[in-house]
Image (cartoon, coloured by chain):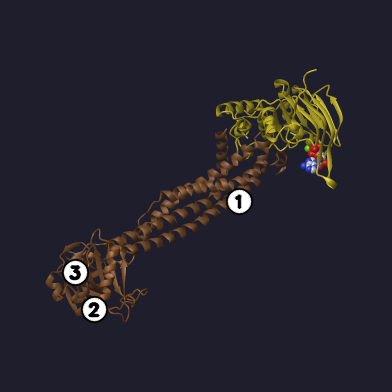
C-alpha cells in the first residue's frame, strides 16, 4: 500500500453555537492516496464544501485529525497552513476568482509571486501553465476579455503553476455550459494522468463525476458511499474544441 | 519578497487609477496648503525685516506722546520738539551719528501739468543719513538753503515717476515743483528703496525743515526726531541718556511720566517679524488640520477598498499569501499613495507659493525643512491610517473573504 497523502479521522465541523449550532460534518474518515482523482458528490447542504475547505487547509476541523503527508494540519498555525497551501495545493473555484483588470499572465503568476520566484521564472512558468490549459497566446487578455470556459482554464493554470501535489476544485464546472464543462474535465483528467496530480473535485453532475476514478457521496454531513469508478470516461471521448489564439 | 510585494502594491495602484487619485487628493491639498502657507509667511517675514532694515540700521525715532499712546502725529496737548532739541542731542550724547528733526505734511504737488498726492517732509541733510538714503542724481541741500528755508527740494522715485516720467531728461532736475502755495526747485532725486510695511517710502518730497515750517505748517515745532547711532555704540546706554536729556529739556519732575516715546527700529523689526511668524505658524497649523483630514480620507478610502477587495484578499490568502504579506501590500499601497500625494503636493506648493509670492511682492522663501516635514508627515499618515484597514484585511478568514461578493 502506498503512503497516504490525506487522512481524515473523525473530522467534525460545527457552525454557530447554542440554538443556531449546526453540525455540518459528523465525524468523517477519508483516506486519499497520491495520484487519485476523486469526485465528491451529494445533495446541497450535505457538507461537501465544508469538507473541501478543510481538505484545502482553508478551514480547521472542530474536532478530529487531518494528516497531510503525515503532518497534523489541525495543529498548524495560520501562516503554516498558508505555506502548506502555497507549496502543495492548488485551488479551482466555481466562480473562477480571477483578479479583475489583470492579465491572464499576471493572474497565473500570482501564486509564484508569493513563493518569491523571480520575474523570469514566473513568466516562463505562467506561460507553460497557460500552454498546458490550451491558452497559449492569450497571456495578455484580462478576465473581461475571456469567455467563462477560458476564465476557468486560466484559473486551472493558476492552480497548477506551482506544480502542486493536489488540486482542489469545488464545482469547477458549476458556471459553465456542457461543452465547456467537458473541456474542463478533460483538462483535469489530463493533469491527473499525465502529471500525477491528485485531483479532488466537488460536482453535482454525474456526467462530470464519471471522469473520476473514485466517487465519495456525502449525505447530511457523513460519507454515505465511497466507490471506485470502474469505467471512468476517458480523454479520447471528449476532445476539447481548439480555440483560435488571439481571437475572442 | 519585499520587492515583489512592492510591485504588487504598485500594480494595484495603477489598476485603480481613479480610486488612487481620489485617495491622494486630500494629501495633495493638505501638503500644498501647509507648504504654501509657511513659504508665503516666511517670505512676508523676510520682506518686513528687509524693509525695516532699509529704514535705517540702529535708528531711534522719538515722538511726543504719553507712554502707551503712540502719537500718530504727536500726542494732542503734549509739547513737541524743536530744532534745538536735535542740536542738543547731537552735541551732548556720545555715540550719536546723526540727528534729524522731521516734520511731515500730506500735500498734493503739481508740476508738468500733473498732480500727485504725496508726503512732504521737512528736515535737514542729516535726514538722508538717518534713513540710509542715496542720491540717484543731483545734490543735497546747502547749509544756506537749510538756514534760510530755501525753496529747494529732493524728490523720491515715485514722485519722479508720477510727475516727470515722459519729460525731457525724465528726472525733473531743475524743474519747479508746486507745493501748496510755493514752488520749489528740484535739486536732487533719491534712489529708490521700494515698497515697505509702512507704505511706499519713495513716495516723498523733502524740503529744508524751515521751508516746511514757514510755508506749510506755520509753526517751529518738530513732530519727530530721528537719531542714528554710530556703528558699535551701546544702544541701551544711548537710549537711557537720550531719555534723561529729553526729560531735563522738557522740565519733567522725577515722578512725572515721560511725555515722549522712543522707538527703536531694531525692536520694531523684531516685534513685526515675530508677529508675522506667529501668523505663519497659525496658518501652517490650520493647513496642517487639512493635512490630517486628508489622512483620514486615506484611511476611509483604504477601509472602503478593503471591503471592496475582500474577495481579492480571500483569494490571495487562499493561494498562499501570508498574513504579513497582505498587511505589507496594503501598507505599501497606503504609503506609496500618500508619499506620492506628498510629492505632488510639494510640486503644486512650489508653483503656488512662487506665483503668489511674486504676486504679493514678497520674496520666495523656499524652506527645505517644511518640505521634508510635510513629505515625512504624509508618508507617516499613510503608515498610520493605512495600517488599521490593512490589518483588518490581513486578518480576514480566507473562506469568509472568498464568500464575500
Ligand atoms: N459559514 C457557515 N456558517 C454556518 N453554517 C454554514 C456555513 N457554511 C456552511 N454552513 C452550513 O453547513 C452545511 C453544509 O454546507 P456546505 O456548504 O458544506 O454544503 P454543500 O454540500 O457544499 O452544498 P452545495 O452543494 O449547496 O454547495 C449547510 O447546512 C450550510 O448551511
Ligand atoms: Mg458547496
Which residue appears at 69% of the width and 42% of the height?
A: B396
Q: Which residue is mark 2?
A: B221
Please give the residue where the numbered disc 1 appears in the rendered image.
B300
Give the Cα separation between the discs numbered 1 and 2.
Answer: 70 Å
In terms of sequence position, does the residue under pointer 1 or pointer 3 come before the other? Answer: 3
User: Which color is chain A depicted in?
Assistant: yellow
Viewer-side label of 1, 2: 2
Closest to the observer: B143 or A39?
Answer: B143
Q: Is residue B135 left or right of residue B194?
A: left
Q: Residues within 10 Å of mark 2 (few under 14, many from 20)?
A: some
Q: Is residue B231 visible?
A: yes
Ligand 2, what quadrant? Answer: top right
Instruction: Kindly report the distance in space between the C-alpha atoms of the residues bearing marks 2 and 3.
Output: 20 Å
Q: Is A168 positioned to the left or the right of B110 in the image?
A: right
Crowdedness of circle 1 by 10 Å Cα count: few (<14), some, many (20+)? some
Q: Which mark is residue B91?
A: 3
> B257 or A195, which is in the foreground?
B257
Beta carbon of the mark 3 residue lies under 8 A of ligand 1: no
Residue B348, placed above or below residue A78: below
| Image quarter in which the C terminus of chain A is found | top right
Which residue reaches farthest left? B144
Kindly indicate which chain is depicted in brown in the rendered structure.
B
Please state, as top left, top right, bottom left or bottom right, where the N terminus of chain A lies in the image. top right
Work out whether mark 1 precedes mark 2 in sequence or the reverse, and give the earlier one: 2
Mark 2 or 3, which is nearer the eye?
3
**Whole-Å distance between the Cαs marked 1 and 3?**
74 Å
Q: Earlier in the sequence, mark 2 or mark 3?
A: 3
The chain containing the residue under callout 3 comes to: B
Q: Secondary structure at mark 1?
A: helix
User: In x, y percent, where is residue B223?
Assistant: 27, 75
Amino acid at each position: 500500500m502506498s503512503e497516504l497523502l490525506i487522512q481524515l479521522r473523525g473530522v467534525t465541523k460545527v457552525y454557530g453555537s447554542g440554538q443556531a449550532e449546526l453540525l455540518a460534518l459528523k465525524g468523517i474518515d477519508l483516506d486519499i492516496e497520491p495520484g487519485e482523482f476523486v469526485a465528491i458528490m451529494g445533495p446541497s447542504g450535505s457538507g461537501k464544501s465544508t469538507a473541501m475547505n478543510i481538505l484545502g487547509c482553508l478551514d480547521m476541523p472542530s474536532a478530529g485529525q487531518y494528516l497531510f503527508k503525515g503532518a497534523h494540519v489541525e495543529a498548524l498555525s495560520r501562516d503554516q497552513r498558508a505555506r502548506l497551501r502555497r507549496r502543495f495545493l492548488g485551488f479551482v473555484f466555481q466562480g473562477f476568482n480571477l483578479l479583475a483588470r489583470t492579465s491572464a499572465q499576471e493572474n497565473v503568476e500570482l501564486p509564484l509571486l508569493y513563493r518569491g520566484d523571480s520575474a523570469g521564472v514566473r513568466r516562463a512558468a505562467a506561460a507553460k501553465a497557460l500552454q498546458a490549459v490550451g491558452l497559449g497566446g492569450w497571456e495578455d487578455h484580462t478576465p473581461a476579455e475571456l469567455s467563462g470556459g477560458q476564465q476557468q482554464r486560466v484559473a486551472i493554470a493558476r492552480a497548477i503553476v506551482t506544480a502542486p501535489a493536489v488540486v482542489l476544485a469545488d464545482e469547477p464546472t458549476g458556471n459553465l455550459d456542457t461543452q465547456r464543462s467537458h473541456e474542463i474535465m478533460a483538462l483535469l483528467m489530463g493533469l491527473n494522468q499525465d502529471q500525477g496530480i491528485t485531483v479532488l473535485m466537488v460536482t453535482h453532475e454525474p456526467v462530470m463525476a464519471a471522469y473520476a476514478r473514485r466517487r465519495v457521496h456525502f449525505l447530511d454531513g457523513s460519507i454515505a458511499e465511497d466507490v471506485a469508478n470502474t469505467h471512468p470516461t476517458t480523454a479520447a471521448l471528449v476532445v476539447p474544441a481548439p480555440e483560435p489564439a488571439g481571437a475572442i | 519578497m519585499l520587492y515583489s510585494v512592492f510591485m504588487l502594491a504598485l500594480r494595484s495602484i495603477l489598476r485603480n487609477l481613479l480610486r488612487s487619485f481620489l485617495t491622494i487628493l486630500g494629501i495633495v491639498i493638505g501638503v500644498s496648503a501647509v507648504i504654501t502657507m509657511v513659504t508665503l509667511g516666511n517670505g512676508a517675514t523676510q520682506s518686513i525685516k528687509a524693509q525695516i532694515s532699509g529704514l535705517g540700521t540702529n535708528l531711534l525715532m522719538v515722538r511726543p506722546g504719553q507712554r502707551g499712546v503712540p502719537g500718530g502725529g504727536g500726542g494732542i496737548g503734549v509739547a513737541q520738539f524743536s530744532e534745538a532739541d536735535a542740536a542738543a542731542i547731537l552735541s551732548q550724547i556720545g555715540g550719536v551719528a546723526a540727528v534729524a528733526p522731521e516734520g511731515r505734511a500730506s500735500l498734493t504737488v503739481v508740476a508738468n501739468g500733473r498732480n500727485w498726492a504725496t508726503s512732504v517732509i521737512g528736515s535737514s541733510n542729516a535726514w538722508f543719513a538717518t534713513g540710509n538714503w542715496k542720491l540717484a542724481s543731483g545734490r543735497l541741500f546747502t547749509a544756506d538753503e537749510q538756514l534760510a528755508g530755501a525753496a529747494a527740494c529732493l524728490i523720491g522715485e515715485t514722485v519722479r515717476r508720477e510727475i516727470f516720467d515722459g519729460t525731457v531728461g525724465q528726472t525733473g532736475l531743475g524743474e519747479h515743483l508746486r507745493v501748496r502755495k510755493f514752488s520749489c526747485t528740484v535739486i536732487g532725486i533719491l534712489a529708490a528703496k521700494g515698497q515697505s510695511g509702512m507704505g511706499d517710502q519713495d513716495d516723498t518730497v523733502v524740503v529744508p525743515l524751515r521751508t516746511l515750517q514757514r510755508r506749510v505748517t506755520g509753526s517751529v515745532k518738530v513732530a519727530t526726531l530721528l537719531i542714528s547711532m554710530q556703528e558699535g555704540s551701546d544702544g541701551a546706554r544711548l537710549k537711557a541718556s537720550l531719555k534723561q536729556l529729553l526729560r531735563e529739556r522738557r522740565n519733567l519732575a522725577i515722578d512725572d511720566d515721560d511725555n515722549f516715546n522712543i522707538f527703536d527700529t531694531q525692536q520694531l523689526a523684531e516685534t513685526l517679524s515675530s508677529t508675522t511668524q506667529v501668523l505663519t505658524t497659525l496658518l501652517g497649523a490650520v493647513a496642517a488640520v487639512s493635512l490630517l483630514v486628508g489622512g483620514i480620507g486615506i484611511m476611509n478610502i483604504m477601509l472602503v477598498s478593503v471591503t471592496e477587495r475582500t474577495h481579492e484578499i480571500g483569494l490571495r490568502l487562499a493561494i498562499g499569501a501570508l498574513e504579513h504579506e497582505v498587511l505589507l501590500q496594503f501598507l505599501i499601497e497606503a504609503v506609496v499613495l500618500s508619499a506620492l500625494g506628498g510629492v505632488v503636493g510639494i510640486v503644486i506648493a512650489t508653483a503656488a507659493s512662487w506665483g503668489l509670492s511674486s504676486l504679493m511682492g514678497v520674496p520666495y522663501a523656499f524652506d527645505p525643512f517644511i518640505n521634508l516635514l510635510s513629505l515625512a508627515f504624509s508618508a507617516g499618515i499613510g503608515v498610520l491610517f493605512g495600517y488599521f484597514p490593512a490589518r483588518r484585511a490581513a486578518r480576514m478568514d480566507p473562506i469568509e473573504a472568498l464568500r464575500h461578493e
